[in-house]
Image (tube, rainbow, N blue to C red):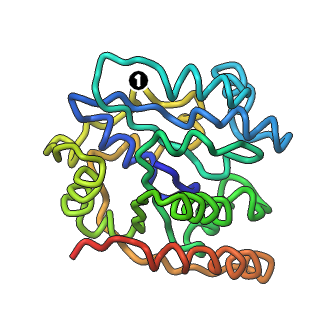
Amino acid sequence: MWSGPRNVSTALMYSWGNRPDTIAIDEPFYAHYLVERDIEHPGWMETLDSQSSDYLEVIKNVLYQKTEKPVMYIKNMTHHSLNMSLHFLDDLVNLFLIRDPGEVIASYIKNIPNPDMEDLGYKRQWEMIASLQDNGKEVFVVDSKELLTNPRIILGKMCAFAGIRFEESMLKWEPGPKAFDGVWAPYWYDNVHRSTGFNRYEKKKVKLTQQYKDLEKECRAYYDKMAQLGVTCY
């Protein structure tokens, strides 16, 4: 699952991680991104200590690991793939989670001020989708508002795309941290730790300064292209 930040991606990981046949992996390329951008995020030292920043090592040891369960769900942030070759995408079932850029920016700047396009991943996400399509690969694109409007329908479509059976266990989970959470969870996952399922979608009232309005416009050019490919809950 390739997602931008603040896209309900952690709740979706909890949904998949609650399947009895699935192992969930949380943002394996986060350390790579932090090193490539040379930036400090909340929990950045713990992150660098917890995983390799060598993306080729991550691909070999994480993405291609042998597991006791037949399904591996990997929560990836598109912006974490900065300066990475994407050759390995052809070996994956690729799902893409998107969200309105105004809502993303308003949420993101509560933790990290002054983001740019590389932090939000819209351009990179579109590049991934376009590359896969150029290579004749199918992609699955869904807006987070569609997921929250009817999780059962959207999860069913995801499972069908991946060639596996939908499980009722994907709709509910126990509150609290999960064993597969990244070490950065205390800084980012407070709300989802209180959840037991997907919250109902509510349109956010977003007010941005001109600085962020310019960024929102830049992101929307890519978001609109991806939204045209998105599945719906109807």
User: What residue lies at 67% left-to-right and 51% top-to-bottom?
Assistant: 79
Q: Residue furthest right?
A: 38
The vertical placement of 173 against 56, above or below, is below
Number of marks: 1
In terms of image quadrants, where is residue 193? top left
On the picture, is 83 further left or further right than 227? right
The vertical placement of 207 against 92, above or below, is below
In terms of image quadrants, where is residue 70? top left
User: What residue lies at 33% left-to-right and 71% top-to-bottom?
Assistant: 231
On the picture, is 203 further left or further right than 103? left
User: What residue lies at 45% left-to-right and 42% top-to-bottom?
Assistant: 92
How would you rate the neighbour count of disc 1 (Cα within 10 Å): few for under 14, some for 14-19, many for 20 or more?
Answer: few
- Viewer-proximal residue among 183 and 143: 143
- Viewer-proximal residue among 123 and 105: 123
On the picture, is 39 further left or further right than 177? right
Residue 74 spot, x, y in % from top left: 45, 38
- Viewer-proximal residue among 99 and 42: 99
Image quadrant containing the C terminus: bottom left
Please name the amino acid that badge 1 sits on.
Ala
Residue 91 spot, x, y in % from top left: 47, 39
User: What residue lies at 57% left-to-right and 74% top-to-bottom?
Assistant: 223
On the picture, is 71 further left or further right than 76? left
Secondary structure at badge 1 equals: loop
- Viewer-proximal residue among 45 and 31: 31
Residue at which label 1 appears: 179
Q: Residue furthest left?
A: 168
The vertical placement of 223 against 7, above or below, is below
Residue 215 spot, x, y in % from top left: 74, 75
The vertical placement of 98 against 26, above or below, is below
Residue 212 spot, x, y in % from top left: 74, 75
In terms of image quadrants, where is residue 232? bottom left
